[in-house]
Image: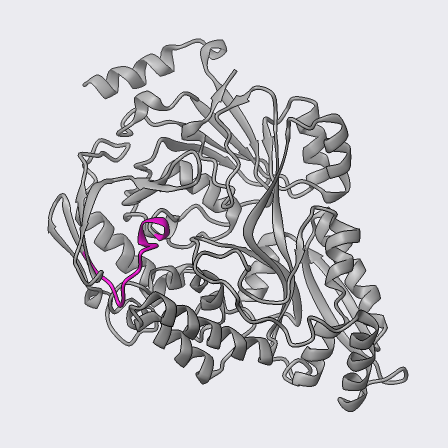
Amino acid sequence: MKAALVAFLLLALPASAQTVLNRGNGPEPDSLDPAVAGSYAETNILGDLMVGLTTLDARGKPIPGIAERWDISKDGITWTFHLRQAQWSDGAPVTAQDFVSGWRRLLDPKTASRTAAMLWILKNARAVSTGTLPPSALDVKAANARTLVVRLENPAPYLPELLAHPSGSPLPRKGSYNGPYTLKSWTPNDRVTLVKNPRFYDAKSVKIDTVHYFSTPDTLAALRRLRAGELDTQTPLPSTQVEWLRQNMPRALNIIPGLTLSYLAMNVRDPALADIRVRRAINLVYDREAVAHKVMKLNEIPAYSYVPPHTSGYRGGPALDFKAMPYPARLAAARRLMQDAGFGPFNKLHLSYAVAGTPDSRRLAAVFQAMARQIHLDVDIQASDFQIVLRNMRMGQYQLAYTDWLADYNDASTFLDLLRKGNPRNYAGYNNPRFDAAMTAAEREPDTAKRMHLMQTAERIALADMPWVPIRYRALTVAVGPRVGGFIPNPGNANRSRWLWLR
């Protein structure tokens, strides 16, 4: 009754009394189904709509969500979550069975989830997602309506951070949400509008009534809208405007060192790219220092590995074997490899390059196109909407594609798992049993130091096979307008609307 009264009062307030936050959110979302969504733009919206067993605080750190507390067995395998008295926005209770059903659905091969591998840490989850076992074999049980017993394949101290991701959400009820906001409307290629959920367990602390997430693939246009006051926040920012922002809007600009790898995925199933000589030549000719220091100018670190060096518990990891080689020597080596592979000035290799049509992505594509000409490689840039690029990558219908990966949790496995056989996000189609065996051994290893060593062994194998061109450890860029309070920069760029307010 009290929640219904709050909802009525919110609707009765005059429009001028309603607080409205306008957020520029990058590419158009493809889905708001937590079992299907996966991009950062979708995660931002779902982070306002859904709460898992855990959630993220204002600093992007995991805190209790629907689970108010949990117990962990001595061996780290069994986690017992005790749920708070929470409700869906339609008034129904959020139960332990909602999580069992949601996770089974996400792992069911019929769902074709992009994020199924996120839950492979759960006992039998990988076998379920590959169709070897039925969803009912997932070792997650509802002991009662408010107690969830979860068994893992191996200890995972990062589990609270992982379960804050939308993939850990309970099964959504039709048209109902359990987070601080509910979905009011979605106008394609314009905005997703959320309104405050009066039945959220901490609704009294939510200060903003309405949140608009605007699709802003054109980051230059989005920045103009922010300067005009039409947007309160925007991420990402066009790198060409960062220096202007430093000079003219320094308080608005946030450059955040993130756990993010920008890389060029190579479809190793393609006949031309199945040749390791070609993949190595492309890795050699890509001038990472020029991109990081002369093109982007964001104080980013050129990437020579797949796992960022500041990842938790992963110090001294391996790197590409030519890291210390001067660029002229790399270029000469790349030309020799292409010649050995049968390519030269009169027999050039032609490859397509898929890229989302953002200003920075187009700039980087043109820069690489010029680099590639030096080794008799003609690159055909094919710019499309982000969703189209992502779908083509998932289906293996591309040759080269520029993308990046923002860590879902602070552990090397979030990067290396992208190359495991069966992972829906293994866009390169990489398949090396030695790599998979090392990752499986790391999964099962309880000793932290030994686990790290096994993952570094796996990364060393993948670096030698070169299914990717690691480019740079990307900085996250966000502009925050003067009206917004409560914004705290963090490496995951997770700033839920729940923690913000308007001045």
Q: In this picture, is 449 found above or below 341?
A: above
Examine the rendering and report whether any part of residue 301 can be seen.
yes
Examine the rendering and report whether any part of residue 422 can be seen.
no
Q: Give the x, y percent position of residue 61.
A: 39, 42
179 and 312: which is toward the camera = 312
The N terminus lies in quadrant: top left
447 and 434: which is toward the camera = 447
Question: Is residue 153 part of the magenta span, yes or no?
Answer: yes
Q: In this picture, is 155 found above or below 502?
A: below
Q: Give the x, y percent position of residue 189.
A: 59, 40
The residue at the point 69 percent across, 28 percent down is 250
Lateral position of residue 499 relative to residue 80, left or right:
right
310 and 1: which is toward the camera = 310
- The segment highlighted magenta reads 150-162
The residue at the point 63 percent across, 83 percent down is 274
Residue occupying the far right of the picture: 346
